[in-house]
Amino acid sequence: MRVIDLCSTQARLYERELVTDISSTLPLVAGDPMRVEQVLINLVHNALSYSRSGAVSLSVAQDGDQIAYSVSDNGPGIPLAQQAQIWQPYKRYGQGPGLGLGLYIVRRLTEAMSGDVQLESAPGAGSRFTIRLPLQNERPQRVQLP
């Protein structure tokens, strides 16, 4: 997985460990592979940026008719009252690097691929972002023209 190669280098720069748990037998998702990669890189980059120390984890597993990609960190966590704002352009929580577009892009791309994104976080407990994307259909669907 190219994401691991790219993010492992960044993890070393942050003096963090990137821990992965990726199932070896995953079916294909319906999303654009380049956009899935972009979403995961954004999530791992954020986790590395906000983690205080230790490891950031990336797990990928089948969950019913979807693939779930989860990125967890041990950063400061995000209070519930602030969680809605991080999905808006140019908004972020805390003093992290960047313009505040990463999570906005994550949400927009994930939704464009018929997926969803979830956040589990609390102050002092870190954060876990999970995106779920549908599995690729084995047979192409017919497109109905109006």
Image (cartoon, rainbow, N blue to C red):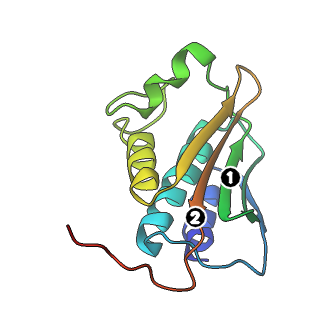
Nearer to us: label 2 or label 1: 2
Work out whether residue 70 or residue 12 is closer to the camera in this orientation and state it.
70
Dot 1 crowding, Cα within 10 Å, few <14, some 14–19, many 20+: many
Looking at the picture, how far across and down is residue 15, in whole percent? 68, 51
Count of numbered tags: 2
Of helix, strand and loop, which one carries label 1?
Answer: strand
Q: Quadrant of residue 134?
A: bottom right
Relative to 86, say whether 138 is above or below. below
> Which amino acid is tagged 1?
Ser
Quadrant (top left, top right, bottom left, bottom right) of the C terminus: bottom left
Quadrant (top left, top right, bottom left, bottom right) of the N terminus: bottom right
Of helix, strand and loop, which one carries label 2?
Answer: strand
Residue located at (39% from left, 41% from top): 104
Relative to 126, say whether 105 is above or below. below
Q: Mark 2 highlights which residue?
A: 134
Horizontal arrangement in the rendering, residue 144 relative to residue 57 (left or right): left
Horizontal arrangement in the rendering, residue 80 relative to residue 105 (left or right): right
Work out whether residue 82 or residue 32 is closer to the camera in this orientation and state it.
32
Dot 2 crowding, Cα within 10 Å, few <14, some 14–19, many 20+: many
Looking at the picture, how far across and down is residue 81, in whole percent? 56, 13
- Which numbered circle lies on residue 34? none
Identify the residue at the far bottom of this view.
139
> Which amino acid is tagged 2?
Pro
Q: Mark 1 highlights which residue?
A: 70
Residue located at (47% from left, 57% from top): 114
